[in-house]
Amino acid sequence: MKKIVISVCTLIFCASAAFADANPFMGEHKNQIAFNLGQGVNSGFLIPPPTQLVPFYILHVQYSQPTTFFKLPARQSINIAQTLGFGERYGWDWDKYTIPMIFLTEDIALAHGKNWYFSTGIGMGLQAQQNERLGAKLLFQFKLIGGYRINDNWGLEVFIQHFSNANTAPENYSYAFYGAGFTYSF
């Protein structure tokens, strides 16, 4: 975990390619909508290994506006998500985790080129009900994103997303997803 934090901090402070006049997430546009679909992973790690895929999915809609984070291009977003669980696997009844969520996030471009970007994101939000997997309604989110802008309006993203209660409750097994989606900037 310590190596991951040091690596991310090094990228933030050393990625001179991230400074730009235009926002790599959405160019000159001021608004963006994203639609994402993620596959669940049974892992408690911040960056989950894709070794235990589970019948757990996330459907996720995001509205974003451009911003900066210590002069790095960024986007602030409001997110509405629905998790969908089916059946049992690895000792968990995934049906119990079909829960809507709402959260606020900040994605920060660590490095980018003309049409691509690599970013990290953090967020905080709520799930509609508490359960034995997370033990709290309060959620914290960490995300790694790789994106490609197809043209001025459309883009594709792949991501790793981790939700946790950050040890604010006795239970904290987390939700983790690998996913992909598309963005429309306007």
Image (spheres, rainbow, N blue to C red):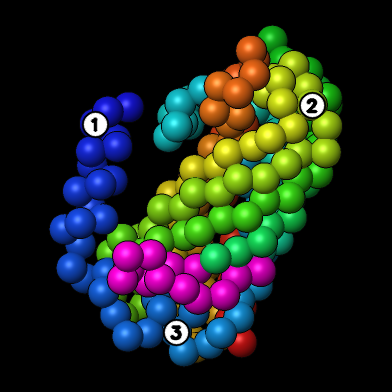
Q: Residue at x 26, y 74 (%)?
A: 19
Q: Nearer the viewer, residue 9 or 61?
A: 9
Q: Position of residue 160 (x, y in %)?
A: 49, 45
Depth check, mark 3 against mark 2: the one in front is 2
Q: Residue at x 66, y 69 (%)?
A: 63
Q: Is residue 117 visible?
A: no
- The Cα–Cα distance between marks 3 and 2, rounded to whole angstroms, is 39 Å
Residue 21 against residue 164 in the figure, above or below: below
- The Cα–Cα distance between marks 3 and 1, rounded to whole angstroms, is 32 Å
Q: Position of residue 70 (x, y in %)?
A: 32, 65
Residue 178 against residue 43 in the figure, above or below: below
Residue 178 against residue 91 in the figure, above or below: below
Q: Position of residue 77 (x, y in %)?
A: 60, 64
Q: Is residue 144 left or right of residue 176?
A: left
| Residue range highlighted in magenta | 63-75
What's the amino acid at mark 1? Lys
Q: Is residue 39 visible?
A: yes
- Can you tell which mark lies on residue 3? 1
Q: Is residue 178 left or right of residue 139?
A: left
Q: Nearer the viewer, residue 64 or 177?
A: 64
Residues at discs 2 and 1 in contact (Cβ within 8 Å): no
* First reached walking from the N terminus: tag 3 or tag 1: 1
Quadrant in the rendering for residue 56? top right
Give the class, few, some or many, for how many residues have Cα within 10 Å of label 1's Cα (few <14, many ≥20).
Answer: few
What's the amino acid at mark 3? Gly
Q: Which quadrant of the figure contains the C terminus?
A: bottom right
Give the class, few, some or many, for how many residues have Cα within 10 Å of label 3's Cα (few <14, many ≥20).
Answer: some
Disc 2 target residue: 130
- Can you tell which mark lies on residue 27? 3
